[in-house]
Amino acid sequence: MAKEFYNAEIVEPQSVYVNLMVAIEGGGPAHTDNPRFQGRDRTNTPMWLLRSMLSSGLFNDAEIVQATAIWWSNDVEGGELRYWPNGASAPAQVHSANMANTALLGDNHCMFHQVGAVGPHDVGSLRVTPGATLGPVGDSSGDWAVDDLGECVFRAPLNTYRLSVLWKADMYATAEERERQVANALSMDDVAERFNQDLAERGSSVRFDPANLDDPELRATIEQFHPEDVPVGALRSVFATS
């Protein structure tokens, strides 16, 4: 299916991971997944810079097109997926109800998407630390519990938790295209050169210094010139502070 969707000759699976969600009031953040470029990914490049590289359009020739397939294991209270296949300025489409054993394939690195509120809806949004664990309670109830800092934060039958599996793969139109990209992997100096040319053409005095990626003025300037889109009709994120 991924080959047909992308008209790609080469499909290189990269990751499979599981998402478990419960008790999220409002919605998750409307977002795109983090992009990757030949030679540049989150192991060697700050997240903000990767996202600016994508929104700037200056690195399209080096972007690794990534397919994402999402499969849902069960139906829960809420847990819809909102997605914007026609761009952030167009209305969202919604996949909801009867989601068990269904899947969607798309380019989640360019397409905004958002998880809707996940029940139960009478407990608010439960916050836990990165050390929280999920496991069977061990009694006759069949419940699974979220334990955090020595306390039970939430417990319910396992089928109450929204469970989805995400599969990601790199896509290449041809073997020759893959070889071309790999042979022209971006160094940080290459990134700096393209941004500096762009900054100069825009009349900015700020310059990209690979040795000073933490410079707040550099980040603010690049993000000002290349802001990320904001999808219309997005739900309020559970992480919103205002």
Image: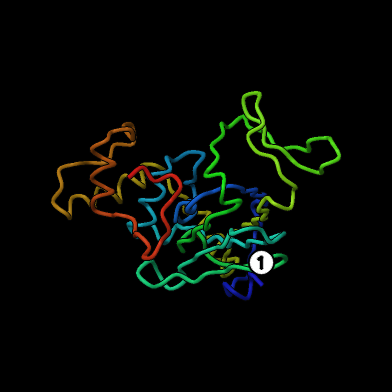
Residue 231 spot, x, y in % from top left: 38, 63
Q: Which residue is drawn at 60% across and 71% down?
A: 8
How dense is the environment of label 1, judged by Cα within 10 Å: few (below 14), some, or many (20 and up)? some
Q: Count every numbered label the image shows and give the total.
A: 1
Q: Seen from this angle, which residue lies furthest top?
A: 150
**Towards the viewer: 89 or 188:** 89
Q: In this view, does 218 lie above or below 147?
A: below
Q: Seen from this angle, which residue lies furthest right?
A: 140
Residue 133 spot, x, y in % from top left: 68, 34
Residue 234 spot, x, y in % from top left: 41, 61
Q: Residue at x 52, y 39 (%)?
A: 43
* Residue 217 in view: yes
What colouring does the structure picture have? rainbow
Question: Can you say which quadrant of the picture contains the C terminus?
Answer: top left
224 relative position to 145: left or right: left
102 relative position to 238: left or right: right
Q: What residue type is labelled 1?
A: Met
Q: Which residue is drawn at 70% across and 40% down?
A: 155
Residue position for label 1: 99
**Towards the viewer: 48 or 194:** 48
Residue 51 spot, x, y in % from top left: 40, 50
Q: Seen from this angle, which residue lies furthest front?
A: 122
Q: In this view, does 214 lie above or below 64?
A: above
Q: Residue 144 lies in what quarter of the image?
A: top right
* Residue 36 in view: no
Q: Which secondary structure, mark 1?
A: loop
Question: Can you say which quadrant of the picture contains the N terminus?
Answer: bottom right
**Towards the viewer: 70 or 221:** 70
**Towards the viewer: 128 or 122:** 122
Q: Residue 214 lies in what quarter of the image?
A: top left
